[in-house]
Image (cartoon, rainbow, N blue to C red):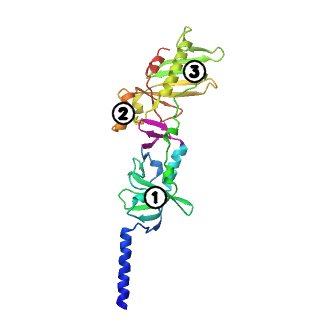
Amino acid sequence: MKNKHLVGLFLGILLFGVLGRYCDFKRGTKLDALLFKKPLATLDKIYIYTNDTLIASRAAEIWLMTRRDETVVAPDSLIGRFLNAIQQIETTQLLHSTRPDTLGLMPEQRLSVVCRSDQWQDQVFFLGREIVQNNLPFTWLALPNHDQYYLVKGHLRKAFFVNFDQLTPPLPMQIDTANMAGLAFFYQSDTLFNMFCDPKLKYWSNASDTNRDTSLLRKLENWKMRWEVMANEAKIADYFDKRSAPETFCGEIRFRYQQTTNTSVNYRLFFIQQPVLPDDPEKRRYFRNFKPQYLFESDLQPGLYFAIKDTSVIHSLKHL
């Protein structure tokens, strides 16, 4: 009788081992550990890989969102959603499974997120299927080179979803030309001109001219129309290294507005004679059709550089 119990115990253990080897069931362990422990203040870029590659990158006080050769300013709400999700990636359950496809974690199913900083090693995680337990949302998560899977709180896949086509391109190059009361152009070390408009007579004059130039108004109106066209075609120069800005700075265009004499907007001008081609093939495609000579940075969005196609708009300022 005693031996029969031992045999039964042996067979039970053997059966449990076989089930554990070939059946996909949870051996869950409750955990309370944050998977992302790096300081978000030093986070520079967030890569999101699905059917397309999206890159959120920090630029001074703002964030940019890039898809292929398109770059727009990312809304604060979108970046806040990313950072909040990253900061709260907390493990609630650990799973050993031989079926990652059931968790949505196969390469063709998952959403990959890479957090990058100059101060720490890349943090990579893969997001799988979202589920609901006890009326609360959870997401399956995997880490590179791990054979374990984590169940974490929240709708993480939804948190990193971006509809790039609905992001509004910024228009910081546009100015209110109808209410301009002054225009100044400083190129390199020279002040080329400083024009102002008489608010009563609506007459523009150039402070450097001793004679009244009756053609100035026509020239200025023509230039303002060209500026507006150029502003609509300006693109964010996300390839420009802001550390080289002091070396390439060449001038400034200052717009003064009619509402108050103290209101003005400055555009700092940078000359890029031979842009350095980036290593990324996707970035190189950008230069085939668009090779800027001038970049702008404005008071409206400091730290964000815009490239223009129509460089003659800048040269024509010298002849106003």
From the image, tell me which residue sits under label 1: 140
Which amino acid type corresponds to the residue marked 2 in the rendered image? Answer: Arg
Which residue is farthest bottom? 1
Instruction: Please state the horizontal and vertical placement of residue 188, each as a whole percent of the image.
Output: 43, 23
Which amino acid type corresponds to the residue marked 3 in the rendered image? Answer: Gly
Q: Residues within 10 Å of mark 1 (few under 14, many from 20)?
A: many
Query: In the figure, residue 128 lies in which quadrant?
Result: bottom left
Residue nearer the viewer, 252 or 166:
166
Q: Residues within 10 Å of mark 3 (few under 14, many from 20)?
A: many
Chief secondary structure of the magenta portion: strand
First reached walking from the N terminus: tag 3 or tag 2: 3
**SS at badge 2:** helix
Q: Residues within 10 Å of mark 2 (few under 14, many from 20)?
A: some
From the image, tell me which residue sits under label 3: 182
How many numbered discs sit on the rendered protein? 3
Residue nearer the viewer, 169 or 16:
16
Work out which quarter of the rendered image holds the N terminus and state it: bottom left
Q: Nearer the viewer, mark 3 or mark 1?
A: 1
Instruction: Please state the horizontal and vertical placement of residue 301, each as a whole percent of the image.
Output: 52, 34
How far apart marks 1 and 2 lie (CA) works out to 36 Å
Q: Which residues are drawn in magenta?
A: 52-75
Q: Is residue 151 magenta?
A: no
**SS at badge 1:** strand
The reply, left or right, for residue 181 in relation to residue 186 is right
From the image, tell me which residue sits under label 2: 285
How far apart marks 3 and 1 lie (CA) works out to 59 Å
Q: Is residue 61 magenta?
A: yes
How far apart marks 3 and 2 lie (CA) works out to 39 Å
